[in-house]
Amino acid sequence: MKFVIQRVSQASVTINQQVTGKIDKGFLVLIGISSSDTKETADKMIRKMLGLRIFEDAEGKTNLSLSAVNGQLLLVSQFTLYADCRKGNRPSFMNAGAPDAAKELYEYIIQKCRAENYPVETGIFGADMKISLINDGPFTIILDSEQI
């Protein structure tokens, strides 16, 4: 599982000219799910993401977590995080999770984050989405379940 976490001052997702999710200060998280991912993988990734201290404190140090700044989450599925570009010029997505299983895990991640009392907005799994954001910093973290 891969999370691309962008610290944002605002972000939104639009589908067919309709905004389906919008946040202010918080994390825009692009979520890639592989064929080997499980709920246990998701739990580990969620814990790590929610524990990240990447917001500035009063002294300008990245020392505050999402909860400490009353941050919000915009969670967007993105299978292209599993693009394999080693051969040729056309990426392979063989390592991405099958749509039904990936959708189930994506929805599980949304539920778990809401259960932790974070305001959560989302895209729509499998839709053609347009993402707008103001990356604060810029500050972007890539979490890979194989590396945490």
Image (tube, rainbow, N blue to C red):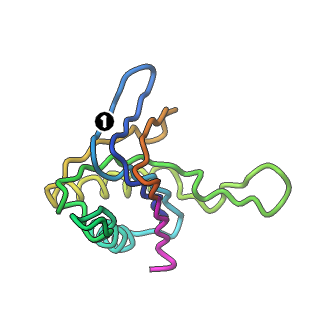
SS assignment at label 1: strand
Question: In percent of the image, x 39 and y 37: which residue is there?
Answer: 124
Q: Classify 4 as above or below 123.
A: below
Q: Residues within 10 Å of mark 1 (few under 14, many from 20)?
A: many
In the image, the segment drawn in magenta is 140-148
Q: For this rendering, which residue is in front, 10 or 61?
A: 61
- Residue 37: x, y in percent? 46, 68
Asked if residue 145 is positioned above or below residue 127 in the image, the reply reads below
Q: Could you say where residue 97 lies in the image, as x and y percent from the top left?
A: 53, 58
Q: Residue at x 34, y 74 (%)?
A: 44
Location of residue 68 (image quadrant): bottom left
Q: Is residue 84 magenta?
A: no
Query: Which quadrant of the figure contains the C terminus?
Result: bottom left
Using the image, determine if residue 63 lies above or below residue 138: below
Q: Going 44% across and 58% down the picture, which residue do you hit?
A: 139
Q: Residue type at mark 1? A: Lys
Q: Position of residue 9 (x, y in %)?
A: 33, 45
What residue is disc 1 on?
Answer: 22
**Residue that appears at 45% across and 48% down:** 77
Residue 64 pos. (x, y %) = 24, 67
Please identify the residue farthest to the right as the structure is shown.
88
Picture mark count: 1
Please state if 118 lies on the left or on the right of 107 as rendered.
Answer: left
Q: Is residue 1 left or right of residue 50?
A: right
In the foreground, 144 or 141? 141
Q: Most extreme residue toward the top, as rendered?
A: 17
